[in-house]
Image (cartoon, grey):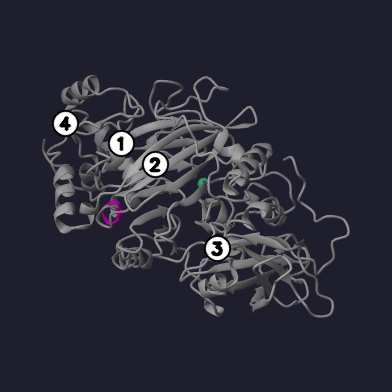
Amino acid sequence: MDRPPLVRPPGAGPADPHQVHLTLASGGGVWVSWATGDGSVGGGDRPPPRLASVVQFGQSAAGLGRTARGASETYTQAFPGGESYTSPRLHHVHLSAADLEASGKEGAAARAVFYRVGDPGPGGAWSPVRAFTPPPRAGLGAYPVRLAVLGDLGQTHNSSTTLDHLTAAARGEPAAGAAVGGAGGGGVAAASTTTTTAAPTPPPAQAVFYLGDMTYADDYNPDGTLRAWPAPPLPYTPSYGPKWDAWGRFTEGLFSAVPAVTTAGNHEIETDAAGRSFQAWRARYKSGPGKGPAALASTAPLYGSVDVGPVHIISLNTYAPWDPASAQRAWLEADLRGVDRSATPWVFVLMHAPWYSSYASHYRELECMRLDLEGVLAAGSVDAVFSGHVHAYERTSRVLDGVPQPDVGGCAPRYVVAGDGGNLERLYTVFTSGPGPAACPPAAAADECGQAEAAAAAADPANNPPFCDATQPRWSMLRQPAYGFGMLDVLSPTRARWSWYANVDGRVRLADSAEWSRDEACLSAAGRAAADARAGARGTAPNAAERADAADAAPPPAAGYAPPPPAELPSQLAAAARAGVAPPPP
Ligand SMILES: [Fe+2]
């Protein structure tokens, strides 16, 4: 990594705030969070001393006339051998939307709020003054809205490059917008739809979608040494807590200026020897509703939603129960029912592990979740789903049940995989099918539903879809193993532009873009019925000859590719197999 934030700067005192960051709060406003003191390994669960949690804020660096107060907490991850980790003191203060509107400058695009954090009492200290642009209130209809997308960042040299590029873009610095992609740069291919003119002065991002897997602390033993792989089975997940503190300082420049919306990944689970999971993520990155102790509780939900102007953002947890009887499923259905699409017409979902990916690693890991919840997202007219986990990039067409849907007039979500921040676990370069390096992974790596699909395909290939396609799936519009980040510009109630920036020889390059539309008709019963009819028009699954004909007829997926009519029904077969019954006859 280019910068060494593992330890705090020499001379930093125990009351000096560090790891300052912002997260969007459910119910409006932002959480301002920071740490004081140091985390410790083997410290005997002795947390740093208590300090007040205070934010001073206002319209200028010299005019911090308002004050908000919050609370602090610590946590301990228990590991055997005297290597338990106790966190620094973690402070959280909620600034409501009303607070922010009263403090920001009126009118101009930059309604900057200046702030500092700390403790005004004896022995306390203040951070430097920082500034951010508050997100617009839900339903204000303020366009454009710019949302950055980042996942699986870690803390490596590649992470530094991605973070620098994203921070510049999120701050609206021209360098990111001026770096226009083209084929042939450093091996990163550009899609043929790549925009050739980028906005010269892109607006600052209002938020960062963080797609999970932050620090990769659990790739280390509690003593800081790198874990052996494959890891021996243990009743807990070893982890090196100071990596969380290092990551908090590493990302401070970005997240103290642009609020994050996070979803937890598998590297946030970190089940310790006492059986506690998600402790670090919950204690450091708040997503609970509004003010008060409930939002700070260790039992705060692992999923939630927030609004940014005309955008409603749902954060799901792919490692919490999502089955039909689960609290998460009930919450998701209620949340989607409650969205006022006249106020927040756009709905996006963040979840760490993807449903649609044609990379060999993590292939069909969440097939059961897809089968259970894809219809819920489609019925809720979700516009796009963003995931990480797969350390590469892939963008799909609108797709429902494996069948590409038209972008204009279609009602299913698009899916973006952007787990390409740059962590130490390497880039994924092998696809499930050619062209290019390809390997269909063993079915045992998939979840039970993926395994059932593989078994059905092996037992009766004439009447079941193959476990891996012979070519790039028709729903896969672009897939590219490269590090980078995304940027989503929501331009109007019906138009948005997606951009993906790749790291190429240390420079940022626009390597993919797509124009996305919304169809208001999808919200109506008639519109949903039409969409369902399109998906349902697939009839029975094609036999091998029909699939071969379709493959011959289908052009290779590329930008501008018009999806052919729906033709396959893989999940019906998988659901039947999962239920232990024979698949439907052809
Ligand atoms: Fe992951």
| Residue 125 in picture, x, y percent from top left | 80, 71
Q: Amino acid at mark 1?
A: Ala
Q: Residues within 10 Å of mark 1 (few under 14, many from 20)?
A: many
User: Total number of numbered labels?
Assistant: 4
Tell me if 555 is positioned left or right of 499 in this view. Answer: left
| Residue 317 in picture, x, y percent from top left | 44, 58
Pointers 2 and 3 in contact (C-beta within 8 Å)? no
Q: Which residue is mark 4?
A: 542
Q: Residues within 10 Å of mark 2 (few under 14, many from 20)?
A: many
Q: Using the numbered discs, state the Cα–Cα distance from disc 1 to disc 3 in whole angstroms.
A: 48 Å
Pointers 1 and 2 in contact (C-beta within 8 Å)? yes
- In the image, the segment drawn in magenta is 373-377
Q: Amino acid at mark 4?
A: Pro
Disc number lying in front (3 or 4)? 3
Q: Which residue is mark 3?
A: 134
Pointers 1 and 3 in contact (C-beta within 8 Å)? no
Q: Which residue is mark 1?
A: 454
Q: Is residue 37 magenta?
A: no
Q: Is residue 376 magenta?
A: yes
